[in-house]
Amino acid sequence: MSQSQHLHLAAAIPMVKPADPAANSERLTSLATRAAEQGADITVFPDWCITGATCGDLLQQPTLLDAAQQATDHFIQATQTLAGTFVISTPVRTATGIQSLTLAVSHGSIVQQVCGGESLTLVDDVILMPTAQPEVAGYYHNLRQRLTQESGHDHKSMVWCNCGFG
């Protein structure tokens, strides 16, 4: 990205309904539409925005994880005609347990994805972090420095997508 270009970021915080992925997907789609209409290039939603982060033991149930996958698929399809990139997060079962899967979605396709606490680089100047918990802020600062050293590019912006818990 050149010096003269501006990247418009939006942080969208839906009223998450815990353990209701279908309703949450509709809310996310509504906010994504609004952000696209207002010219956002990247719209970031909270961590675990598909299910809410307070589902506790319900996250161990295949029914909720299946519903989360269906709601994620619905969001991806519903945003295929919208301009911009949308970053959402949903729980998935992995070999090590339930993890947060962060997806960057653009025009109905997943353009990037990370699972767990990894970072997502959307453009040269923006590093997206799936969470912003205070105990890991130092980790992210060190990661930013490491990425700057390795790439030779000063990553000036970091976006943390944990805007709150549902």
Image (tube, helix red, strand yellow):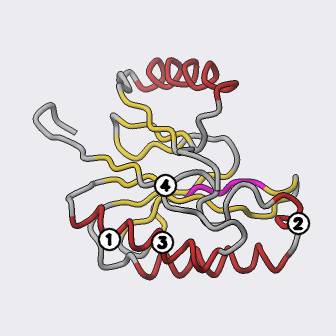
Residue flagged by tag 4: what amino acid is it?
Phe
Q: Is residue 64 magenta?
A: no
- In the figure, residue 97 lies in which quadrant? bottom right
Q: Quadrant of the N terminus?
A: top left
- In the figure, residue 63 lies in which quadrant? bottom right
Residue visible at 42% across and 26% down in the picture:
151
Residue visible at 87% across and 52% down in the picture:
96
Q: Is residue 55 above or below residue 30?
A: above
- According to the picture, the residue beneath numbered tag 4 turns out to be 45
Towards the viewer: 151 or 24: 24
| CA neighbours of label 3 inside 10 A, class few (<14), some (14 to 19), many (20+) | many
Q: Is residue 83 above or below residue 144?
A: below
Residue flagged by tag 1: what amino acid is it?
Thr
In the image: residue 60, left or right of residue 113: right
Tell me, yes or no, whether the two marked residues, 1 and 3, touch with CB atoms within 8 Å.
no
Residue visible at 53% across and 62% down in the picture:
15
Residue 46, image x, y percentages: 54, 52
Residue 134, image x, y percentages: 64, 26
Q: Which residues are magenta?
A: 99-103
Magenta stretch: helix, strand or loop mostly: strand
In the image: residue 154, left or right of residue 57: left
Q: Earlier in the sequence, mark 1 or mark 2?
A: 1
- According to the picture, the residue beneath numbered tag 1 turns out to be 33
| CA neighbours of label 2 inside 10 A, class few (<14), some (14 to 19), many (20+) | some
Towards the viewer: 105 or 62: 62
Tell me, yes or no, whether the two marked residues, 1 and 2, touch with CB atoms within 8 Å.
no
- According to the picture, the residue beneath numbered tag 2 turns out to be 60
- In the figure, residue 107 lies in which quadrant? bottom left
Q: Give the distance between the C-alpha atoms of the residues marked 4 and 3, in whole angstroms.
A: 11 Å
